[in-house]
Amino acid sequence: MKKGNSQFSTLNSQFLAFVRKEFHHIFRDIRTMLVIIGIPVFQILIIGFAISNEVKNVEVAVFDPSNDEATHRIINQLDASEYFHVVKQLKSAGDADAEFKKGKIGLVVIFSENFGKNLYRTGDAAVQLLVDASDPNQGMTISSYASSIIAGYQRELLRETNIPIRISSEVRMLYNPEMRSAYNFVPGLMGMIFMIVCAMMTSVAIVREKETGTMEVLLASPVKPVYMVISKLIPYFIISWIIFVIVLLLSVFVLKVPITGSLIWLNVFTLIFIVVALSLGLLISTIVDTQVAAILASGMGLIMPVMILSGYVFPIESMPPILQWISGIIPARWFNEGAKKLIIQGASIRSVLKEMMILLGMAIVIITVSLKNIKTRLE
């Protein structure tokens, strides 16, 4: 009996030793643990605060040739609501398209001539609502909110005057009159694909060499680290461009999404974003030491911020200010905004210069930090 107890005690101690060994193996890689624990915490916080289908703080431009009490009251009611923020008075109705292509305005309100006079004399006046329908769901929500506010003002006048009054609201959905969802998700999906696939390809490839020990041999060679890094990125850059061509062809010929802007500039803009995504993978490879950690960081770690904070699924304007600020450091946000302008709105390169310069700046900063990290770790 004692012999059986002794054997059981030995097996138990051996089992516990294996458990302790496994825990030690897991916890000794601090970076991997931070990735494993940090990603779920980060994701739940982002999801909890960012997910909202409501549209808030939509920037509005107004063309008001009438400039009377009635139009002022409607404008004030729009601005006072939580949904809209009137930011600009247009000099002509023709300026609306240019304002939309700047990427900030979501709604343009155009009042008819002598709006107030017509309203009180004939009981009928017209207002036109131009809505950016690149995102059809957001466009429908914006038009619904604006029409509701105008209808509310009409009810106020009916109570005040007790005479039949009707405000005709004409809604025009720009850039996506058929309200097809593909117009919205194609640019966003392209950004998510490149952000995750490019980062994962690069990080895993470089970490694999670190695990096998060949990376240190390469860095110790006479070739400068910058040339070595560029040589490793070029094949993935070419593969990523081929993926872009495939996605673009599928979007045009299968999903029937028209490319209304310059195809050349769309290529240039996308290639800049691909460089950012590849450099992000390079940065991840300098931080983690295992392929598992690289996959977690470049896959799970990026997919949620890209999906939620890029404006691909949820409007950035509806997020808390702190998350709007954080979204500014998500490269996919700037690609999404620029690609929409080039693909859907047919904007010129001038309209995407801001997004292009931001992505170029991100690429330079990330590559510089990555190269410095590589040298430091080698030393």
Image (cartoon, rainbow, N blue to C red):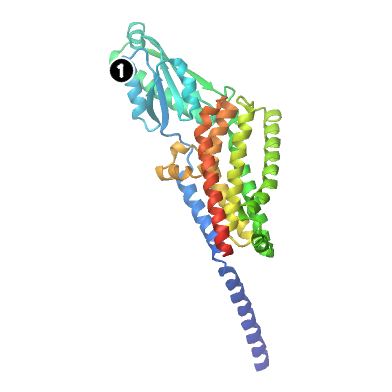
Place of residue 318 in the rendered image (x, y in percent of width and height, measured from the top left): 44, 38
**Which residue does the image show at 60% across and 79% down from the upper left?**
16
**Which residue, as the protein is rendered here, is positioned at the far left?**
160
The N terminus: image quadrant: bottom right
Q: Amino acid at mark 1?
A: Arg
**Which residue, as the protein is rendered here, is positioned at the far bottom?**
2
**Which residue does the image show at 63% across and 54% down from the upper left?**
203
**Which residue, as the protein is rendered here, is positioned at the far front?**
222
Camera-side residue of 351 and 122: 351
Camera-side residue of 10 and 164: 10
Above or below, 154 relative to 305: above
Q: Is disc 1 placed on a helix, strand or loop? A: helix
Place of residue 379 in the rendered image (x, y in percent of width and height, measured from the top left): 56, 65
In the rendered image, is residue 182 in sight? no
Can you identify the residue that label 1 sits on? 159
**Which residue does the image show at 42% across and 34% down from the upper left?**
56
Place of residue 220 in the rendered image (x, y in percent of width and height, measured from the top left): 64, 62
To which quarter of the image does residue 251 belong? top right
> Tag count in the figure?
1
Badge 1 local density, few (<14 within 10 Å), some, or many (20+)?
Answer: few
In the rendered image, is residue 59 in sight? yes
Place of residue 190 in the rendered image (x, y in percent of width and height, measured from the top left): 62, 38
Above or below, 371 relative to 63: below
**Which residue does the image show at 58% across and 47% down from the upper left?**
303
Above or below, 118 relative to 335: above
